[in-house]
Amino acid sequence: MTVDDLYRDLHTNPELSFEETRTAGIAAVGLRTAGFDVIEGIGVTGVAGVLRNGDGPTVLLRADMDALPVTEDTGLEYASSAPGVMHACGHDVHVACLVGAARELAATRADWSGTVVAVFQPAEEVGRGAQAMLDDGLFEKVPVPDVVLGQHVGPAPAGLIGAHSGAAFASADSIDITVHGRGGHGSRPETTIDPIVIAAAIVGRLQTIVAREIAPQETSVVTVGRLAAGTKNNIIPENAEIGLSMRAYSDEVRLRMLAAIERITRAESAASGAPEPMIEFAESFPVTVNDRVATERTMGAFRSAFGAEAVIDPGPVSGSEDVGLLATAVDAPLVYWILGGAHPETYLRAANAGTVDRDIPSNHSPRFAPEIQPTLDRGVAALVTASREWLRR
Ligand code: ZN
Ligand code: ZN
């Protein structure tokens, strides 16, 4: 099957996080056919393939496999056939490109020496897949890499490559807070501890974290996206719930923000004489940091292969990723780049009109539809070019 056909097939058959069994099976067959040794079921549905080809460095290539709970609205003939599930983040592009790159590296193995490790990771969207593979002993099953490489398709002109040295993707934490009060009659507040008033004070005070505790030149966000309490106007409820998310571009800022959220939540509860609140940390993505030296080296290889105009530095991206865990777990440098997937002329028209944000569907949109070409060819070539830069010639 060509990479294009493989992509269409994956797009039609998306699978949610940790349920990527069909996708994992296709990846395993692709790797085995190319001559890789394959290990399946790492971190539930993860797959790793190893191609040993003499002495030299070990390169790890990573693709994530999961889709999202989104109802597709692209009108494509190869649109999702799974109700309410869609490859709206383009992980199908990543899988197809990594299968293509594995084939090409295997077919050209006379030209290089070293070891290629291809990792198909589950559950990136919930921030747990990379950790699940590590917890399941990934690096006891495959050689420890000298560099970790990967790519994410996004709404830039198809074929364009963007990489940023240093903090490239934000950390993201999702936190659920339950404020405990003491319920009672709305006419007799003196017999209660009102969790709604406490929650309101917490929400207001959380706004001071970014404004008053973080340096102005640091980029960070705290958003309360969910606030729920009560059933009737004259009942003071027992509890109130706050759902918030936060993003930062350094571990230092992230930890400072997490500590501030916890401190404010506990202090506002204590100020009202309420019981200890419950603070639960749900999804969590660390900051994704591209190694400066390794990124410059890889970008140089891209410029030589694709031309200087095809490679840009997009600056830090506000999205989040868990690919960095695979690198930090073994202290290897990470190089993770953006692969443009938007129709070039449509993109140019929107850019000239200043309407890119409106006209180019972003990742997670029900209309996210990367161009198949030149995106896939460039995605395969980028993985191969980056690998060959690190492998021995
Ligand atoms: Zn993604
Ligand atoms: Zn995503």
Image (cartoon, helix red, strand yellow):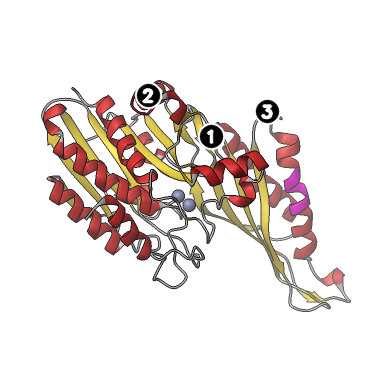
| Residue shown at 40% from the left, 20% from the top | 293
| Residue shown at 75% from the left, 46% from the top | 207
| Secondary-structure class at tag 2 | helix
Q: Residues within 10 Å of mark 3 (few under 14, many from 20)?
A: few
Q: Main secondary structure of the magenta part?
A: helix
| Residue shown at 46% from the left, 61% from the top | 68
| Secondary-structure class at tag 3 | loop
Q: Nearer the viewer, mark 2 or mark 3?
A: 2
Mark 3 = which residue? 217
Mark 1 = which residue? 251
Estimate the spatial distance between the alpha carbons at disc 2 and disc 3, rounded to whole Å: 26 Å
**Which quarter of the rendering shows the C terminus?**
top left
| Residue shown at 22% from the left, 42% from the top | 102
Query: Could you say which quadrant of the image residue 16 lies in?
Result: bottom left
The numbered mark at residue 195 is none
| Secondary-structure class at tag 1 | helix
Q: Is residue 234 left or right of residue 162?
A: right
Task: Please tell me whether residue 338 is drawn above or below residue 293 in the rendered image.
Answer: below
Mark 2 = which residue? 294
Q: Which amino acid, by three-letter code, is at mark 3?
A: Gln
| Magenta-drawn segment | 203-207
